[in-house]
Image (spheres, rainbow, N blue to C red):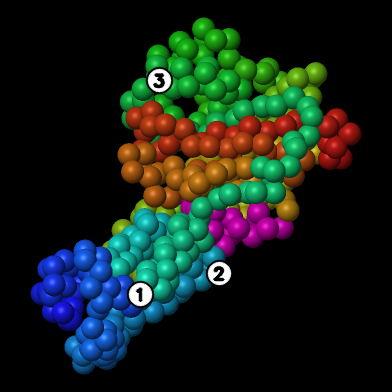
Amino acid sequence: MSSTTRPSNSAFWRCDRCGTPNPSASYVMACLGCGSPRSAVAVKAETTQSLVPPSRTQRRRRLILLGLVVGYGLAVFVAGLMVRLVGDAWWPGLLLLMSPRWLFLAPALPLGIVAWRMKRLWVVGIVGIEVIFVLGPIMGFSFPLGRLAGKPPEGPTLRIMTFNRGGGPNDVARLARYLDRNKVDVVCFQEFAPDPALEAYFAAGKWHRDSSGAIASRYPIVAEIPRPPEHNLDRDRYTVTILRTKIAGPEGRLFVVASIHLPTLRPGLNRLFRGDVAGLRLQAVWWGEEMARLVDVLTDSGGLPLLIGGDFNMPVESAALSSVLGNGVFQSAFEEAGIGWGYTRPASVPWVRIDHILTTPDWTVTRCWVGPDFGSDHRSLVAEVVFPAPQSVRP
């Protein structure tokens, strides 16, 4: 008796002799139940059916899917160029820098699901590559393999934190426990207001403070460097805050710590949302001028190693900041030794890192990470650095 009857599911054929359903695979030439041979006519019919070309509707759907995936890839590529090459030099790039860049991941999930259901696995692979590009270059994922794989130089280490307290109430008890548990030696504050609980913690721990309260150190503060003159144009275009101290570290080694706060771009962004593109550009130009003035001031540190912690109000991809890091004057602690994205703001769901720790090249950064939420609209940033060897102190 021949075995040619097919069940409703085309993935099987049913034996006429015993009724066993068998998989429609070319190598199954006999019934798995009774051994009855499979009809050659049935094999030919199934092979012919598998070669039926897709319908016009199927082809159209595949072309639409491919077009969407290619369009998504082009958008991701252009966004990567905007982040890495354009930055704040053009207002769309500036808006992209300050926006949550993980939004570029939104189209990936539906595209991947549709491609999977249409059995286009190679399209799923392309979407996966696009996702990796978003997570990496666009979102600014850091993985400094060279620094992490190398052996750090020997010498005493120091841990520095920068923290914009946001002007509101902070969880001082949690902050104090974090400073003690992580053995933080120096803290740079921005937007700080007197807080009796925080003052009591520093007093009990015998910390040293500068007169402004912006810098706290477990090592002695030996001098405060005068603030540079202010240069304010209007309420929104105000001067950068620069507070500096000289500190005597292990073995009396002197170094300079600076707590800085650059003007915010928020007024310019508000103008952009009202349709005033020129207003945003004006604010961005002012930020760049203040960044240049900051560099001029900080490069005059008396030849001492310098640590800078502050709220820069701009991500590291900004043209002015990246040029400073690129010319070897300063190095970014997170780019040197941080892993991940390092976002610091907003504190609840951070999507951008505008708080940075910079050092002169004579320091070696061994670690850098983002702290928890202490109640501010910013998260803190902490870095561990190795003191420069005495002979490497710059003249």
Q: Name the residue under label 3.
A: 174
**Mark 2 residue type:** Leu
Residue 200 seen from this side: yes
> Is 140 drawn above or below residue 48 in the view shown?
above
Residue 244 percent across, percent down from the top left: 63, 33
> Is 287 drawn above or below residue 72 in the view shown?
above
Specify the quadrant that holds the N terminus: bottom left
Quarter of the image for residue 55 reads: bottom left
> Is 394 drawn above or below residue 180 in the view shown?
below
Specify the quadrant that holds the C terminus: top right
- The answer to which of 213 and 7 lies nearer the viewer is 7
Quarter of the image for residue 272 reads: bottom left
Question: How far is disc 3 from disc 1 in space, using C-alphas?
Answer: 68 Å
Residue drawn at the location 30% of the way across and 62% of the way down: 109
**Mark 1 residue type:** Tyr
Question: What is the residue that sits farthest to the front in this orientation?
Answer: 1
How many marks are shown on the rendered structure? 3
In the image, taking residue 207 as reference, residue 362 lies left or right, namely: right
**Mark 3 residue type:** Arg
Residue 60 percent across, percent down from the top left: 24, 88
Q: Mark 1 points at which residue?
A: 27
Q: How crowded is mark 2: few (under 14 residues within 10 Å), some or many (20 or more)?
A: some
What stretch of residues is rendered in magenta?
A: 313-327
